[in-house]
Amino acid sequence: MSSTPNRATNPAGKPRKKELALDLTTARQMLPLVKSIVSDILNSRQVLSRLTPEQERLDRHRRDLVWQERQRRYQVTDEIAAVEKTLTHAAGELAGLGVNLVDEDAGEVDFPTKINGRPAAFTWKFGDTAVGHWHYQGEDQLRPIPNEWDQSTPATPIRFRGQP
């Protein structure tokens, strides 16, 4: 019998999330899949923006609706639920890839990384052809990705010129 007390390594029971740091090459390789998922999100949001006012109108007049309008109200409710499920699934896919959806309206995502040992992110926005900008975590200023970063290997940490 051991005299050491049994202690939980994670007393709160929360899963520990390993901090993910993607290199530029990986972020660019992930882009076609991310682009497809973000496209689904934007399309779903567009459908919601079309259906929500209709649902609100039908709900306001629910007591006065004829059968066909009531049927449409039920149909719109079901469509909205399906679209919201699609949105939740798409956001989960991005999270599973380790990519952060920064702006749902614009379709902007961040690929987490480390630059000079600091948490940062490569940024891509729907409509852009490639991942072309980066920023430090907590900063809004987007900076263009320098050409020399394209030559770095995945195992090479990104450093500015003149940095050790």
Image (cartoon, rainbow, N blue to C red):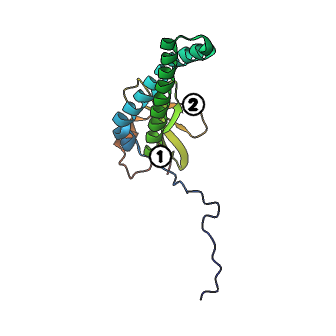
Q: Position of residue 63 (x, y in %)?
A: 62, 14
Residue type at the position of mark 1: Arg
Mark sitting earlier along the chain (2/1): 2
The disc at residue 141 is 2
Residue type at the position of mark 2: Gln
Q: Position of residue 159 (x, y in %)?
A: 47, 46
Query: Does residue 100 appear left or right of residue 61 in this picture?
Result: left
Q: Position of residue 66 (x, y in %)?
A: 53, 10
Residue shown at 48% from the left, 45% from the top? 113
Residue nearer the viewer, 130 or 7: 7
SS for dot 1: loop
Residue shown at 40% from the left, 33% from the top? 37
Say if residue 131 shows up in the picture. Answer: no
Say if residue 75 shows up in the picture. Answer: yes
The disc at residue 159 is 1
Picture quadrant where residue 97 is located: top left
